[in-house]
């Protein structure tokens, strides 16, 4: 899954998308809650190895060939050069989106929601093209050293809903076909030295011309009542 590449460095805070379908609030301070349906901080865009656009209310990410977020299990090598749009993670919250990758056939291209605190401190929830040619859900957590790739079965559809929940000191990943009935995938914790950000990314380790759209964005500050559904 890994393709050698230089680590990308996050740009400074660049912009705040303000269309009604993709609202983003000004930064919240202290315990103040973000506006309903809005992200609590502006998105930081890293486009060193790709292109990020907002088209007709959709967030579009087009990664260059050779992009990946990957760490070998033994920690001997890592790649962290995904184009990404991230915001600061504060408190408990639920973040979900429908991802629509334009799969072209090359293995491991895909769209992801990620939790990122450094080159070897992150979690990735990925809808990708598998080496078999089918589409599937993969998750990886790197917590200071190597990654622990896990696969959660093939998906027949060309689009998926992905969800990240932050609750207390932990993170939870979910996936869904319809955005209403969710499948619990995994729970984990991260011990990152730096600040943690969450958001949207896409990868194309082996392919040219891949792009992925993110729509149906949902953000809600606060905890969950149903662990298995993340709601």
Image (tube, rainbow, N blue to C red):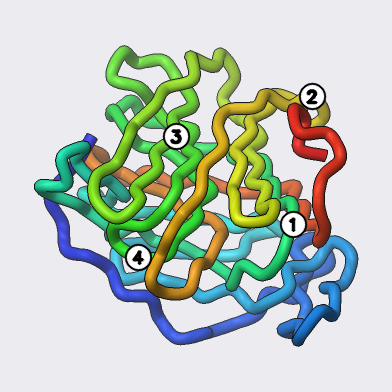
Tell me if label 2 and label 1 are in contact, CB under 8 Å.
Answer: no
Which residue lies under the disc numbered 2? 181
Which of discs 2 and 1 lies nearer the camera? The answer is: 1
The mark nearer the N terminus, 3 or 2, is 3
Q: Which percent across, then down, holds residue 177?
A: 69, 24
Give the structural element (helix, strand or loop) at label 4: loop
Give the structural element (helix, strand or loop) at label 1: strand
Q: Residue at x 66, y 35 (%)?
A: 161
Give the structural element (helix, strand or loop) at label 3: strand
Marks 3 and 2, how far apart at CA: 19 Å
Which residue lies under the disc numbered 4? 118
Q: Which percent across, then down, holds residue 51?
A: 41, 64
Marks 2 and 4, how far apart at CA: 32 Å
Q: Quadrant of residue 204?
A: top left
Q: Which mark is residue 93?
A: 1
Q: Which percent across, then down, holds residue 118?
A: 35, 65
Tell me if label 3 and label 1 are in contact, CB under 8 Å.
Answer: no
The mark nearer the N terminus, 2 or 1, is 1
Q: Nearer the viewer, residue 227 or 89?
A: 227
Q: Is residue 34 left or right of residue 152?
A: right
Query: Does 212 appear above or below 50?
Result: above
Query: Does 38 appear above or below 109?
Result: below
Which of discs 2 and 4 lies nearer the camera? The answer is: 4
Q: Which mark is residue 139?
A: 3
Q: Is residue 110 left or right of residue 3?
A: right
Query: Does 6 appear above or below 173?
Result: below
């Amino acid at each position: 899954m890994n393709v050698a590449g230089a680590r990308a460095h996050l740009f400074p805070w660049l912009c705040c998308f303000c269309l009604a379908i993709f609202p983003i609030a000004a930064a919240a301070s202290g315990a103040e809650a973000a506006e309903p349906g809005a992200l609590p901080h502006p998105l930081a865009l890293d486009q060193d190895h790709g292109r990020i656009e907002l088209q007709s209310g959709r967030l579009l990410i087009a990664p260059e060939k050779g992009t990946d977020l990957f760490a070998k299990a033994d920690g001997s090598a890592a790649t962290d050069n995904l184009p990404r749009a991230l915001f600061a993670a504060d408190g408990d919250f639920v973040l979900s989106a429908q991802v629509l990758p334009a799969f072209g056939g090359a293995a491991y291209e895909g769209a992801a929601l990620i939790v990122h605190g450094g080159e070897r401190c992150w979690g990735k929830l990925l809808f990708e093209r598998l080496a078999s040619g089918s589409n599937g859900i993969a998750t990886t957590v790197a917590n200071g050293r190597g990654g622990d790739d896990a696969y959660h079965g093939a998906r027949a559809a060309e689009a998926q809903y992905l969800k990240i929940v932050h609750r207390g000191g932990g993170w939870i990943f979910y996936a869904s076909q319809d955005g209403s009935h969710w499948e619990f995938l995994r729970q984990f914790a991260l011990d990152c030295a730096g600040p943690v950000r969450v958001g949207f990314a896409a990868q194309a380790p082996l392919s040219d011309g891949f792009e992925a759209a993110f729509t149906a964005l949902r953000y809600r500050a606060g905890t969950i009542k149903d662990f298995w559904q993340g709601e």
